[in-house]
C-alpha cells in the first residue's frame, strides 16, 4: 500500500522526534507517563531546603547556586528570601535523569524527577512528578526488602503500577507517600528497578477494570475480606481465605500488648472505659465490630483511633481478642496490617518456593487477570 503525503510527513516527524529523543535522552515512551505523588506531608511544614545539581531547571528562574531555601508565607512562596512570582515553583523535569534532594529538620531524602512546590495557608505542598515505572521501582524499594526473592518483588511491582494507574484516594486521584496509599521514599534499589522493567506495563484487573490492590504485611495464616475490615460491599477478589505461606514472618507467631484503661479511654476520646468487647469477628479472627461500654464501633475505626493516639505499632493488626485485667486491657493477636488482599510475607514464602508472580497474585486476588496497559 502506497503511503500518502500526510502519512509520509507523519512518519518523518515521528522519526525526527525519536532521533531528537535518543540524542537528548528524553523519556519518549521509555519511562511511562508521569505520576504525581504528594511527598513528606507529615514531615515538612513551612520551610524546606532543596538541593539541586548544576544545570537543573527552576521555574520561575532565580539567581543562585544549587541550594533553594523555600518558605511558605500564607499562600505565597519565598525562595532564598525573595517572593516567587507565580503560584508554583517547578524544579527539574519529570524524567529519571533529573534528581533533587530535600533537607528538613536534620534529615534528607533524594528523589528522581520533578518537584512542584506551592504554599497553602503557611504549609508547603511538595509534589514529586516522575515517570510511572520510576515510581513503581521506588514503591517496590520502600515496600519490600531488596533481599527478598524476585517473584515477590514482581508481584509488588504489579500492585504498585495498578494503584498508580487507578489513582489514590485523594483529590484528583493523587497519591501520598505513606501506607495509606503505598510507601514511596524516592530512593530505588537495583532489584526494584529490574523487576519494574521486567513487569513493565503489567496491571491487575477484574472483569477488565483495575482492581483495588490492597495488601498488608502479614496475615498470620488467615486473611480478611474487604467487607469485614472496611465495611461496604464485598469485592469478589478480596474475600477471606487461608495463607499457609507467611509463617516466616516475625509477626505471624502472635503478639500480645497491655494497654492501660485510661490510655485507651483517651485514644477513644471518652472519660472512662469499663468494658471492651469484640462483637463481630471473621472466622479467622479479624475484628469487624467492637463495643465500648455498650456502644458499637467498627473495628477499623477503633484500630485507627488507637494507632493515631497511641502509635501504629501498639495494635499491630485487626486480628485480635481482648480481655480486661486489673486496670488494663490485654490484646492478643496475630499478623501485621489490615489482612486484606496480598500478604507480603506470604508472597515471599511462595516466591521462596519458586512460585511465579502471576500465580502469587492469583492466589491473593482470585478471579483477576494480569493485562498490559
Ligand atoms: Zn494516600
Ligand atoms: Zn499471610
Image: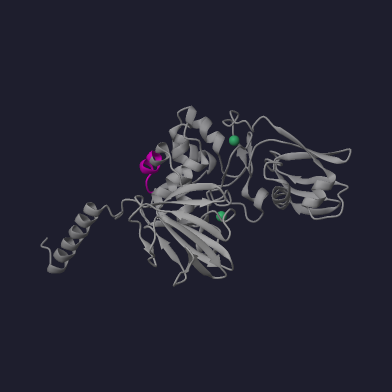
Say whether residue 313 is left or right of residue 193: right
Residue 253 position, x and y percent, is: 67, 29
Say whether residue 362 is left or right of residue 223: left
The N terminus lies in quadrant: bottom left
Instruction: Inspect this view and state whether residue 207 appears.
Output: no
**Relative to 164, residue 117 above or below:** below
Given residues 81 and 30, the one toward you in this image is 81
Q: Is residue 290 magenta?
A: no
**Relative to 59, residue 157 above or below:** above
Where does ligand 2 appear, by image quarter? top right
Residue 5 position, x and y percent, is: 12, 68
Residue 22 position, x and y percent, is: 23, 52
Which residues make up the magenta segment?
194-201
Please name the residue shown 35% across and 60% down the image: 57
Residue 199 position, x and y percent, is: 38, 43
Please name the residue shown 12% across and 67% down the image: 4
Amino acid at each position: 500500500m502506497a503511503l500518502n503525503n500526510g502519512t509520509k510527513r507523519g512518519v518523518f516527524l515521528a522519526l525526527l522526534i525519536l532521533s531528537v529523543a535518543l540524542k537528548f535522552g528524553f523519556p519518549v515512551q521509555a519511562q511511562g507517563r508521569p505520576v504525581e505523588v504528594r511527598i513528606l506531608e507529615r514531615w515538612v511544614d513551612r520551610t524546606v531546603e532543596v538541593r539541586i545539581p548544576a544545570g537543573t531547571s527552576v521555574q520561575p528562574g532565580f539567581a543562585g547556586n544549587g541550594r533553594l531555601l523555600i518558605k511558605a508565607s500564607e499562600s505565597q512562596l519565598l525562595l532564598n528570601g525573595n517572593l516567587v512570582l507565580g503560584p508554583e515553583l517547578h524544579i527539574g523535569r519529570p524524567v529519571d535523569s533529573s534528581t533533587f534532594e530535600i533537607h528538613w529538620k536534620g534529615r534528607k531524602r533524594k528523589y528522581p524527577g520533578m518537584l512542584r512546590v506551592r504554599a497553602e495557608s503557611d504549609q508547603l505542598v511538595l509534589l514529586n512528578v516522575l515517570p510511572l515505572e520510576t515510581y513503581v521501582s521506588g514503591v517496590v524499594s520502600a515496600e519490600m526488602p531488596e533481599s527478598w526473592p524476585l517473584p515477590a518483588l514482581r508481584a509488588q511491582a504489579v500492585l504498585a503500577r495498578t494503584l498508580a494507574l487507578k489513582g489514590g484516594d485523594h483529590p484528583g486521584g493523587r497519591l501520598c507517600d505513606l501506607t495509606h496509599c503505598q510507601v514511596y521514599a524516592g530512593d530505588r534499589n537495583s532489584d526494584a528497578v529490574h523487576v519494574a522493567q521486567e513487569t513493565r506495563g503489567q496491571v491487575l484487573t477484574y472483569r477488565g477494570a483495575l482492581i483495588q490492590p490492597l495488601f498488608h504485611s502479614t496475615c498470620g495464616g488467615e486473611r480478611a475480606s474487604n467487607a469485614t475490615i472496611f465495611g461496604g460491599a464485598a469485592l469478589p477478589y478480596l474475600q477471606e481465605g487461608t495463607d499457609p505461606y507467611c509463617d516466616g514472618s516475625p509477626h505471624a507467631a502472635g503478639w500480645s500488648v497491655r494497654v492501660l484503661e485510661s490510655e485507651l479511654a483517651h485514644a477513644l476520646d471518652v472519660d472512662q472505659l469499663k468494658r471492651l468487647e469484640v462483637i463481630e469477628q471473621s472466622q479467622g479472627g479479624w475484628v469487624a465490630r467492637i463495643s465500648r461500654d455498650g456502644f458499637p464501633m467498627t473495628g477499623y475505626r477503633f484500630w485507627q483511633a488507637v494507632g493515631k493516639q497511641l502509635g501504629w505499632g501498639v495494635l499491630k493488626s485487626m486480628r485480635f481478642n481482648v480481655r480486661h485485667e486489673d486496670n488494663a486491657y490485654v490484646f492478643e493477636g496475630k499478623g501485621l496490617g489490615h489482612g486484606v488482599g496480598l500478604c507480603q510475607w506470604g508472597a515471599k514464602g511462595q516466591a521462596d518456593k519458586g512460585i511465579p508472580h502471576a500465580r502469587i497474585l492469583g492466589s491473593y486476588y482470585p478471579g483477576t487477570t494480569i493485562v498490559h496497559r
